[in-house]
Amino acid sequence: MKRILFTAALLLCALSGLAQIREPIDTVMGPDSSAIIMFSDKTWEFESEYIQKDTVYADWVESAFEPQQIPLNQIPDTVFLDLKDSMGIFCCPYVGVPSSRYGYRHRRRHQGIDIPYPTGTPVVAAFDGVVVKSGYIGGYGNLVAIRHYNGLETYYGHFSRRDVVVGDWVTAGEQIGLGGSTGRSTGPHLHFEVRYKGYPFDPERLVEFTDGRLRADSLVIIKRFFGANSRFGIDDYIKLDSLAEASKPQVVYHTVRSGDTLGGIAKKYRTTVGQICRLNNISSNKILRIGQRLRVK
Ligand SMILES: [Zn+2]
């Protein structure tokens, strides 16, 4: 409400042309979601309930369960997100050893990570945010989903009990439910997903689940992360391997057949006799043997 009043005041100022535009230039966070907002006209305001609701409620339809995916071509190729700063902390929902990772398994897409635990284990919100889904939803069983201030969404599936309802504001580390095995599940485990604009990507890009550590205070999301098999680690190694492969000189051999001459071979591979001689440490008048392997590139 306060924000709306500010906006109205700004509009009035702009319309009357009497004062310079007063816009927020910096925000200093205080305790308990309070903030001091500094304005361009050297004034400041104290807000006791400062929450970035614009980001949290963007393209969210309360009645729809299906993620509100915007077309992929409307998402920038690279997105930079702050995960942890003076405004919020991270709390690992559950620290444990993953039993199933992001990517295809048994020809089915797995768009999260599974971490086994006993039924009844408390699960906490990863970051501050608002509960956007809380219900029994198909294969997820009892599902809670939270949208965070930076635009990320986290999903927690297979709960035996949900402790929050849609619209609840939660802080990082707050209990949101108890672990279980509801929905399509073969044993009690946390199914945890991270999504951006409705698109899931590998949660291990953010978190090392075995020790509950956030890998970095910020995250760079690259569009290819949304690929169903774009797994943290493996995917990056594949990329490095293919780069190394591409930078390696290409090696080609020719097996000498009846009638081959050095000149003919050189012409065939678009190289020179001198180059073939250097590669094989031979002289240009060397007699070729049938079946002999010559490096030509
Ligand atoms: Zn799962």
Image (cartoon, grey):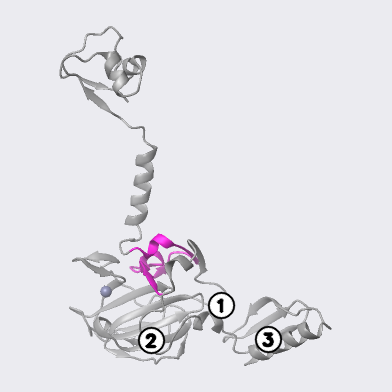
Could you tell me residue 278's position as x and y percent?
34, 16
Q: Residues within 10 Å of mark 1 (few under 14, many from 20)?
A: some
Is 191 included in the stretch rendered in magenta?
no
Which mark is first along the chain, 3 or 2?
3
Query: What's the residue at 39%, 77% (across, down)?
Result: 154
Identify the disc placed on residue 87: 1
Which mark is first along the chain, 1 or 3?
3
Cα separation between marks 3 and 1: 23 Å
What element does badge 1 sit on?
loop
Residue on which the image places disc 3: 7
Residue on which the image places disc 2: 64
Q: Quadrant of residue 204?
A: bottom left
Q: Can you tell which of label 3 and label 1 is closer to the viewer?
A: 3
Q: In this rendering, is residue 83 above or below 133? A: above
Pick the front one: 296 or 208: 296
Residue type at mark 1 is Met
